[in-house]
Amino acid sequence: MKAPALTGMLEEIRWGLSRPQKQLPSKYFYDTRGSELFEAITELPEYYPTRTETSLLKTPVAGWVTEMAPASLVELGAGSARKTRILLAAMGHGKLQRTDQGTDHHTDQRTYAPVDVAGDFLRATAESLRVEDPSLDVRPQVRDITWDLDFVDELPAPVLFALLGSTIGNFAGEAAGELLSNVRSAMGENDLFLVGADLRPGAGKSIERLEAAYNDAQGVTADFNLNMLRALNRDAGTDFDLTAFRHRAFYDEGEGRIEMHLVAEADQEVQVPGAGVVKIGEGESIRTELSCKYDRSMLTGLFEAASLDVVKWCTDEDGLYAMALVSPM
Ligand code: AVJ
């Protein structure tokens, strides 16, 4: 984390730890080590979202993208950009086809603007993409995706926005609508927005399977969860005892969301710069993540409220995961 952000970070921590249900923002998972742990999560046998989304991206989403032939891709919360390569390849093909047909596309120049809060990780990803494809114009943007997306004005149009990996699930309550509206206001008339979302349990998806994705046998998710305390100790100057908390994750059926917590195994006293000592009782927990799950009508409603129309929709055959392509109304 950069120095100017420290005040904001401490304010968020103080506020979160003063709530009746203590909480910390999920974005603090993603320091370099946390980003690496998340990559490891995506490869776990229990964690189906990444695998399912990758398969949907290959078919049918790549076809949608080829049809659209975007000049730029803005990926919100890019991480390692592994799945991005599928989209970039589909963009390239679109361009060539159009040129062959004699339309006024004279270039297959593509621009890729990954946006992420994890700066070092983002820059490393950008660098490896540049090496892989020197013709790709890579413009990494280190920022919070809920803030300004003004840089989009500078990008060649049409622009494809992408919010993959069910990142939208981390935006609970009104925050999801605010995020979608924020993207909507950065969109031009001919731009499109691709959103991947993890679905609620249903006929082909049990609650057990959903919960197992957040309670893997190898304990990688537990390490990922605990790593947030390590990141805060280093970047915010707190002194959480990492050995005194254990990972807990469960599905709340009423709310339709996974909650992740760190449960104190004994009474804890934590120093929070500017807020003195914060007490956490034995058995008390800090909530570190909400991962909201959706169904089609909920998502359609969220999009409509942000003046976005669903133009394409698909799910895998078990109904684990969905992808929606939306356009400005
Ligand atoms: C990146 C927010 C979509 O909620 O599934 C994975 C993060 N947390 N395992 C998710 C996560 C625990 C992930 N998102």
Image (spheres, rainbow, N blue to C red):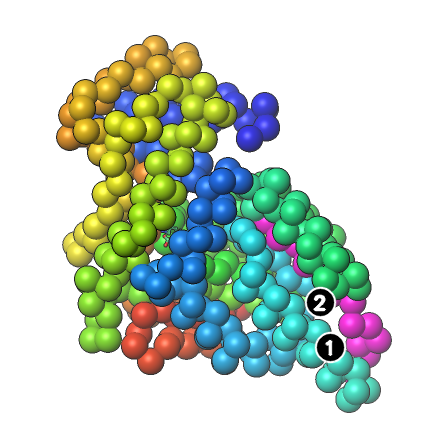
Q: In which quarter of the image is the N terminus?
A: top right
Judged from the image, the secondary structure of the residue bearing numbered disc 2 is loop
Pinpoint residue 38: horizontal percent, then vertical percent.
Answer: 44, 49
Question: Which SS class for mark 1?
Answer: helix
Residue 298 found in image quarter: bottom left
- Asked whether 181 or 276 is in front, the reply is 276
Q: Position of residue 20 (x, y in %)?
A: 21, 28
Residue stretch rendered in magenta on the structure: 103-115
Above or below: residue 304 compared with residue 26: below
Is 109 magenta? The answer is: yes
The answer to whether residue 304 is seen in the rendering is: no
Which image quarter: residue 299? Answer: bottom left
**Where's residue 141, x and y in %?**
64, 45
Residue of label 1: 95
Q: Residue at x 78, y 67 (%)?
A: 109
State the residue position of label 2: 71
Query: Taking 28 as reference, is 292 above or below it?
Result: below
Q: Indicate whether residue 223 is drawn in magenta.
A: no
Q: Which mark is residue 262?
A: none
What count of labels does the image hold? 2
Asked if marks 2 and 1 touch (Cβ < 8 Å), the reply is yes
